[in-house]
Image (spheres, helix red, strand yellow):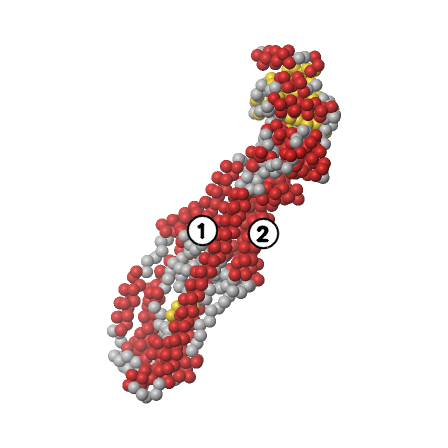
Amino acid sequence: MLQAIDLTKKYNNNIVLNKLNLNVEKGEVFCLLGQNGAGKTTTINLLLGFIQASSGEARINGESISPKKNKARKHLAYIPEVVTLYGNLSSLENLDFFSRLAGFRYSKAELETILGQVGLQPEAFHKQLGNYSKGMRQKVGIAIALAKKADAILMDEPTSGLDPKAINEFTSLVKDLGQQGKTILMASHDIFNAVEVSTRIGIMRKGNLIHSLNTMDINAPELQQLYMDTNKS
Amino acid sequence: MRTVFIYEWKRLLRQPVQLLSLFVFSILSLYSMWEGKTIIGEQKEGIYALEQSYDEDFKEVLGKFKVTDTTAAEKKDAEYAKMPVMISFWLPQNAINKPSSLAFLSIGERDILPFYKKVKTSVDYLDNSNVGMDNPLVLWAGNFDFSFVLIYLLPILIIIFSYDVLSREKELGVHKIIAVQGLGNTGIAIYKLLFRAIILCTLVLVLSLIAFVMADTIEFTLLELWILGSLSYMLLWFACCFLVTSWQWGSLSNLIALFSGWLLFVILLPSCTSIYMNAKQPIPLRSSVASFQRETSEDIWGSDKKMIVDTFLLNNPRYKKYYDPDKSQGTSGWGPFEIAGYYDLLQRRVEKHVEPYEKLLEDRRQTASRLNRWNPVIQMQKLNNRLAQTSLKDFQEFESNVRTFQEEWRDFIYAFQLPENEFLQEDLSDFPVFEQKDKLPKTSSSMEQLIVLWSWILIFILIGVIGYKTQSLKI
C-alpha cells in the first residue's frame, strides 16, 4: 500500500532521512515517533511528493510519488499539525471547496453526513471556521480527507495542542478509519496516544528508523522507556 | 476554476476590508470625475465669458458704424471704425482651445497652460507659457482627476487585493492540503489572480462607462482606446503581482516588494528623471526676452523707415500688391507699411532671440521623453492625456493653429490697412474665424504607449512563469 524503499533525503551533505524502508498495509495505523529533527515530517513530505527524494522511492498502491509525478496524490489525503483552512468559510463550505478541488461534488446532505461522521455537531456546520476550536478544525480536516475517499491518510502531529477530550475523540476517529480500511501514517510526539491509536509504531532518530514495533507487543510505559533509551544513546 | 471563483466570491463578500477598499475606490473615482468636471466647467465658464465679452465688443463696434452724425464723440467713433488698425485694436480675435469631451477625465496640462489666446496682428512673445509636464512633481501634485485615480490609486487597490494570493494559503497552512487535493498551488494562484482581475476590471469598466456617460459626447474610438489602455495598465499590475507571488515569499514581503515597485515606477523613477533633467538640462530662463524686445523695439523705431519697408516687402512679398511708392513716407514718416514693417521686423528679431530657448526647451522635452520612454506609469499618463486631448502635444498643435490663424488675421487686416482702404460695416461679417482642428487621436498614435505597457506585461508574466516553474512549492 504505502511504501518507502531506501528513501533518502539530503540537504547538501546533511542526511535528514537515511534509507528508510517502510510498508504500511491497508487498514494499518502506523505511528512515527521521534524527537524534533528525527525525520518524521520529512518522511511525510516525501510520501506526499512535496519534496524530491535524494535517492530511493516512495510509492502508493505501487505508483511512484514525487513532485514531478503528482498523479499518485489522488490516493492520498493529508492532515497538517494545525488545520486552519479558510476562517471566513463555514465547515460545510470548506468541505465543499476542498472536495471540489479533488474532483468530488457532494450534495449538501452528503456533506453534512461526512461532517457528522467526524463528530461535528450540526449547529456548527454553518458557523465560520474562524470561530472553531482547534479540535473542531481538526475534525473538518479529517472530513476533507474522508470526502476525498483517499486510500491513505498522512497526519503530521495531529494531536498537538488538542485538549484531552479532543484527543480522545480524535483517537476513536482514527481507529474507525483504520477499521474502514484506510491506511494511516501519523507522525507524533505523543507516546500514550500512539499506543492507543496505532497498530504499529516506528521510533526514529536522526533520520533513521531505529525500531518498528507491533502495538500489541508493547504497553505505554515500555514504549516510553524504549523511546527514552533510543534518544539517549 | 469555477470552484475557486465561487469560493473567492464568497470570501470576498465576507472580507470587510476589501469591500471597504472597493467602496472607497469607487467613491474616489466618482469624486475625481466630479472634480474634473468642476475644473473643466470653470474653463468652459471662462470660455463662455470670453465669447460673451467678444460679442458685446462686436456689438459695440457695430454700433459705431450705425451712428448718425449726432454728437462729436459719435462722429469721431464712426471715423475710427473705418480704420482697420482700430478694428484690430478693438476686436482682438479669440483663439480658444475648447476642452474635448474627455478632458475632465484626464486634465493633463489644461490647467497650467493657457486655453485661449487673444490674436492680434502682431505677436507678443512675453505671453508664452512654457510649463512642461516633464516634471513628475507637477504630475504628482496634479489634479485629482479620474486618470490620477486609475494611474496612482488603482495599482494600490490591485496590490491590496493580490499581494497574498499564494502566501495566504501558506500562512493558513492549507497550501499542502490544496496540493494534495490535486490542484497545484500555481493553479490556485493563477485562478485567484484571475478572479481579482475580473472583479477589478469589471469595476473599472463600469466606472469608465459612467465617466463616458458624463462626457458631453461619446466617441466610440476613444471609449475603446480608454478601456484598452486602462485594462492593459491593470494587467500590468496584475502581471507584477503574478511575478512577485511566484517567488513564494511571505505576505508581508510580497506587500513590501509590490509597494516598492509602485514607488519605483510612480515616484522614484520620474523624480530621478526630473532631478537629472534639472541638473543636466535646466529649464532655460527667458528673463532676457523682455529687455531684448524693448531694446529691439527702440532700435527699429529709430531705424531708417525705407529700410524697414524694404525688409518688410522682401520678407512678405504677398503685400507688395498693396504698396504704392508714391505714398511712401520717406525715411522718417510712419505710414501703414512702416508700422507693419516695424512689427514684422520686431517679431522676426525676437523670434531669432527666442529660438535657442525654444530649442533648449524642446531638447529638454525630448530627453525627458526618452528617459521616461519605458516607464509604464508615465506612458499611461501620456496615453490618457492624448485621449483627452490635454497633452503638451495637443497644446503645441493648438499653438501652431494659433500661429496660422494669426497670419490669416493679419492678412485680413492688412488687406485694408496697407492700401489704406476704409473698413466698412459689411466687412465685419468677413472676419476669419479660428477653428479648432479637433483631431481625434488615432489608434496608431496610442500604440506607442500601449506597446510599452504590453512589453512590461510580457516580461513580468514570462519571469513569473519561470519563477513558478523553477520553484517547486516551498514547504
Q: Residue B228 occupies which quadrant of the picture?
A: bottom right
Q: Which residue type does callout 1 highlight? A: Leu
Circle 2: residue type: Thr
Query: Is B346 situated left or right of B134 in this image?
Result: left
Q: Nearer the viewer, residue B138 or B101?
A: B101
Between discs 1 and 2, the one toward the N terminus: 2
Secondary element at image label 2: helix
Rendered location of residue B397, percent (x, y):
45, 65
Q: Share a chain, discs 1 and 2?
A: yes
Residue A161 in picture, x, y percent from top left: 58, 24
Q: Name which quarter of the figure residue B342 lies in.
A: bottom left
Is residue B461 placed above or below B310 in the rendered structure? Answer: above
Q: On what subunit does the disc labeled 1 rest?
A: B
Residue B283 in view here: yes
Identify the element where label 1 is drawn.
Answer: helix
- Answer left or right for A181 relative to B271: right
Residue B371 circle label:
1
Give the residue number, with chain letter if any, for mark 2. B202
Q: Position of residue A92 (x, y in %)?
A: 66, 37
Residue at 74%, 25% (x, y): give it. Answer: A181
- Name the chain letter of the residue that bears numbered label 2: B
